[in-house]
Image (cartoon, rainbow, N blue to C red):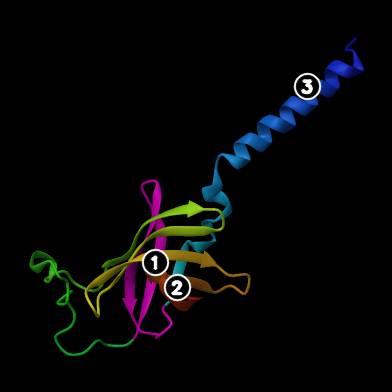
C-alpha cells in the first residue's frame, strides 16, 4: 500500500511537469494569428501559416485589381526581386511569439519597404498588424476571410 504523502508528491510532480511543458511552448498560446485575413484596405487576402519555427504571411488572393502593370513587386529596392509576382509574395516574415504578440517583419509591396512587425490576435476576431520604424508604428486591422 502506498503512503498518502508519496501519492501527493507524485501528483504535484506530474502537475509541475505538465505546467513546464505548457510554459515552454508559447507558440501554441499565440497561434490565433494563423489563417486567412483580409487586409484593412480590402485589396488582398493574406494567408498566415507556420514556416519553419516561425510564422509567415503570403498574399493568397487579390480582391481588388492592382493598377495596370503592378502585378509584380516593381517597387522592391532589390532590382533582382522586382519581377516577383504579387500573388504568393511573402509580406509577413520571421514572426516569432513573444507573449500574446508575434514579432517579425512586414513588407509593403506598394512602397517597396520593410518594417518591424508586431502582430496580435484581438478578442473581437480581428488581427492587429503594426509596421514600425523606431518608436513610430502604423496600425492596421485585418478581418478574418470567411
Which of label 3 and label 2 is nearer to you?
A: 3
Instruction: Name the quadrant containing residue 90.
Output: bottom left
Q: In this figure, which residue is indicated by the disc labeled 2? A: 37
Callout 1 touching callout 2 (CB < 8 Å): yes
Query: Which residue is pictured at 41% across the width and 79% down the height?
Result: 39
Query: Which residue is pictured at 40% across the width and 51% down the height?
Result: 54
Look at the image and say whether residue 88 sits in the magenta stretch: no
Query: Which residue is pictured at 88% across the width and 12% down the height?
Result: 2
Task: Answer few, some or many: residues within 10 Å of disc 2's Cα (few below 14, many 20 plus, some between 14 and 19).
Answer: many
Task: Answer few, some or many: residues within 10 Å of disc 3's Cα (few below 14, many 20 plus, some between 14 and 19).
Answer: few
Q: Estimate the x, y position of residue 51 in percent, counting from the top left.
A: 36, 52
Magenta extent: 39-63
User: Mark 3: which secondary structure?
Assistant: helix
**Cα gap from disc 1 to disc 2, whole angstroms:** 6 Å
**Dominant SS in magenta:** strand
- For this orientation, the residue located farthest to the front is 135
Callout 3 touching callout 2 (CB < 8 Å): no
- Determine whether, in the image, residue 51 is placed left or right of residue 78: right
Query: Which residue is pictured at 58% across the width and 72% down the height?
Result: 125
Q: Estimate the x, y position of residue 11 in percent, counting from the top left.
A: 79, 26
Q: Estimate the x, y position of residue 83 in percent, counting from the top left.
A: 11, 71
Closer to the chain start, of discs 3 and 2, is 3
Q: Estimate the x, y position of residue 14 in percent, counting from the top left.
A: 72, 28
Mark identifier at residue 58: none
Closer to the chain start, of discs 1 and 2, is 2
**Cα gap from disc 3 to disc 2, whole angstroms:** 45 Å
Q: In this figure, which residue is indicated by the disc labeled 3? A: 10
Q: In this figure, which residue is indicated by the disc labeled 1? A: 47
User: In the picture, which quadrant includes the N terminus?
Assistant: top right
Task: Answer few, some or many: residues within 10 Å of disc 1's Cα (few below 14, many 20 plus, some between 14 and 19).
Answer: many
- Determine whether, in the image, residue 28 is placed left or right of residue 70: right
Asked if 141 appears above or below 94 in the picture, the reply is: below
Amino acid at each position: 500500500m502506498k503512503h498518502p504523502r508519496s501519492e501527493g508528491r507524485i501528483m504535484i510532480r506530474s502537475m509541475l511537469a505538465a505546467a513546464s511543458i505548457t510554459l515552454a511552448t508559447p507558440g501554441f498560446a499565440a497561434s490565433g494569428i494563423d489563417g486567412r485575413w483580409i487586409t484593412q484596405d480590402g485589396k488582398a487576402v493574406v494567408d498566415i501559416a507556420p514556416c519553419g519555427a516561425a510564422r509567415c504571411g503570403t498574399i493568397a488572393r487579390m480582391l481588388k485589381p492592382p493598377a495596370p502593370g503592378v502585378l509584380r513587386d516593381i517597387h522592391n529596392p532589390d532590382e533582382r526581386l522586382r519581377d516577383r509576382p504579387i500573388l504568393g509574395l511573402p509580406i509577413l516574415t520571421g514572426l516569432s511569439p513573444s507573449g500574446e504578440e508575434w514579432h517579425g517583419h512586414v513588407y509593403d509591396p506598394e512602397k517597396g519597404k520593410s518594417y518591424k512587425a508586431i502582430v496580435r490576435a484581438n478578442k473581437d476576431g480581428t488581427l492587429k498588424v503594426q509596421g514600425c520604424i523606431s518608436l513610430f508604428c502604423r496600425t492596421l486591422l485585418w478581418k478574418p476571410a470567411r
